[in-house]
Structure formats: C-alpha cells, structure tokens
Image: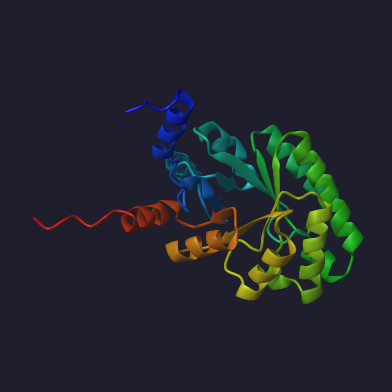
Amino acid sequence: MTPLPDTVAASTAGLDAVTPPEPLLTPAKLELAVAGPALTDDHVHAAVTLACEQGIRAVIVRPSDVDQAARAMFGSTLLGSFVGFPHGSSTTAIKVYEARDAIRRGAREIHAVLNIGKLNSRQFQYVEMELIQLAQVCHEHSAHLRVIFGTTLLNEEGKLVASKIAKRSEVDSVLPALGPVPVDDEALLLKKCVPLVQLAFYRDSLDGVLAALEQGCTSISVPQPAAILEAWKQRNTPPASAS
C-alpha cells in the first residue's frame, strides 16, 4: 500500500483533532454586583473571595469598598466599581472624579448609572457629553465602561435615545438595571445596541442565564454565581449508571 504524502497525512490527522465547541456557559460570562447598602466589610470580603475562586468575569463593589476589594483580588476576575449610584444624579464632574478615583485604587471596570432625570427631561446633549467624558477617562486607563440605564424608570423615548447615545459615546457595554426588567426593555436593547455595544442582563436562575446568552448577551449579572455554576455542572454531569 502506497503511503500517503506527509502533507496529506498531516491534514488527515488533523481531522481527528477537532476542537470541541466552547460551552454556552463558563464562569467568565458571569459577574457579581456587591452593592447592598447594609453589607459589612466581612460580607464584601467573602463575596470578592468567592468570585475570584469561581473565576467569574467581574465583581463590582461600592466605591468605598474598592481598596479592600483590591487587596483581596486574585486570578483573572476583574474588579469594578459604581459611579453615580443608584440613580445617576451626581454632576458630571463628580462622576468623572469617581471614575478616576476608582481606577486609581484598582478598579478596571466602571459601572456608571445614567442620569435618569436628565434623560427623561430630554437633556440629551447633557447625557451624551457625560458619557463621552466617562468613556475617555476609562479608555485612557484601559478600563471598561458599562452604563446602567435603569430602564424601568425611563420613558419610551428615553430608552431609544439612551441606546443611540451609548453607541455614539463609545460605551463598552450596557446593563438595563441591577435587577429584573420587562422583557420588552431587553428586546429593545438587543435590537438597538448590538453589535456596537455589548449587553449584560441580570438573571437569578440557570435557565434565565442560558436564555440570555443564547440571545446574544456577553455577560450576565447574577446574585449567586456559585449556585448558577453548580446547577450548570449538575445539568451537564451524566447520571451514574445503575450497577
């Protein structure tokens, strides 16, 4: 039998080494917001440690917790902090300072809350200029800027305009809110923001996480990442064969 040429043999061998597809859910697609007003330092430390142990994409803490969280960080998990929390009503100068301060202290992701009152007042230029300045600050320091819209507090015009402004301002990603929002709001953002702006949704169940990833979200904010990952592991573990 005539042996195959080296090039053909190598090509044929490569057919057996097919790279398996990436699973729909990985820890790097989950993130945790540690934002409760009554959380103690111990709560924050435990949450940050668990997030890093799980290898999730990011853990987002309150501004006053950045120093503590930065000392506890390890692995590939990103540290983030909030700006203008909870309703985005701080002045632009304050938000810019908050972003610079958080980045200086170790944050590599800024979650800025849109100025909901200004947007509903049709002060669109104000909102856009604010996001442009925040994007410049973040990108100068290789940090990621996410904008939290608070869609449940926006009127219909505000949701549409906010999506356009996010794209023009070079925002990296958008989160509708830090909690559940109407399905119609998520559908609107999927239509208006993707692919120029990444989307993150909030979910509290494995099925919800998987559905959001299938829709095109790049990351999912969850209240209990360990529970989501354990449920995913169990779902993908084949049942033990009967002896």
Residue 90 in view (yes/no):
no
Can you give x and y, in whole percent of width and height, for residue 19 in the image? 45, 41
Can you give x and y, in whole percent of width and height, for residue 151 in the image? 70, 68
User: Closer to the camera, 196 or 46?
Assistant: 196
Q: Residue placed farthest to the front in the image?
A: 1
* Direction from residue 211 to residue 188 in the image, left or right: right
Q: Residue at x 45, y 40 (%)?
A: 49
Can you give x and y, in whole percent of width and height, for residue 126 in the image? 89, 58
Can you give x and y, in whole percent of width and height, for residue 115 in the image? 79, 61
From what the image shows, is residue 12 above or below residue 230? above
From what the image shows, is residue 105 above or below residue 192? above
Callout count:
0
From what the image shows, is residue 115 above or below residue 95? below
Which of the 4 image quarters holds residue 68?
top right
User: Closer to the camera, 35 or 198?
Assistant: 198
* Direction from residue 231 to residue 44 in the image, left or right: right
Q: How is the image coloured?
A: rainbow
The quadrant in which the C terminus is found is: bottom left
* Direction from residue 16 to residue 103 in the image, left or right: right
From what the image shows, is residue 103 above or below residue 116? above
Residue 149 in view (yes/no):
yes
The quadrant in which the N terminus is found is: top left
User: Closer to the camera, 180 or 172?
Assistant: 172
Q: Residue at x 91, y 59 (%)?
A: 125
